[in-house]
Image (cartoon, helix red, strand yellow):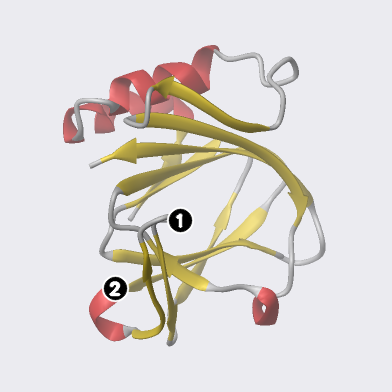
Amino acid sequence: MILDHLQNATTYSPLHPLFNRAFSFLKETDFTKLPEGRHEIDGDNLIAIHQSYPTKPEDQGKWEAHRKYIDIQYLLAGRERLGIAPIHTMTVAEDYNPETDLTFFTGAGQFLPLETNHFAIFYPHDVHMPSLRLLSVSQVTKCVMKVRI
């Protein structure tokens, strides 16, 4: 997992051939004009999911991981708490679903804040729990870039 401010994104561009394009999209897009939902940037190789939601308590969160995509979760507005755990420390709760690219897990992890203009990168070995309340409910606007492995 990587957690950083968008101004430092170029540091991570060498990690994947599509990271530069993903970070450029996040920096250059006027999200006030982009409808919420799924937007293909490069077919199914690079997808942006623009979303808005209130953060939730930890007991409503789910531990998840992906196999086909790396997540770059960028917070446009609000604050949330993210859970992170190494996959080898977790127990599968729901088997992998190739349609949704999700496996759900149970277990324990660490929690970190995600602030406006910051992003988190989750690789397949990073089990994560997004969208949680930090101190109180926050209305969050986020763009999740799905980067095909």
Left or right, 74 with reference to 95: right
Residue 18 at x, y percent in the picture: 27, 26
What is the quadrant of the N terminus in the image? Answer: bottom left
The image shows residue 98 at horizontal and vertical percentages of 36, 58
Q: Please indicate whether residue 101 sits to the left or right of residue 137 in the image.
A: left
Q: Secondary structure at mark 2?
A: strand
Q: Nearer the viewer, residue 39 or 142?
A: 39
Residue 36 figure quarter: top right
Q: Which residue is mark 2?
A: 86
Do tag 2 and tag 1 residues touch (Cβ < 8 Å)?
A: no
Q: Which quadrant holds the C terminus?
A: top left
The residue that label 1 is drawn on is: 100
In the rendered image, the vertical position of residue 30 relative to residue 123, given as above or below: above
Say if 2 sits above or below 143 in the image: below
| Residue found 76% across the figure and 50% down from its top | 53
Q: Check the image and report above or below for 81 versus 6.
A: below
Which sits in the foreground, 94 or 75?
Answer: 94
Closer to the N terminus: mark 2 or mark 1?
2
Between residue 122 and residue 96, name the one nearer to us.
96
C-alpha span from label 2 to label 1: 21 Å
Q: Residue at x 29, y 73 (%)?
A: 86
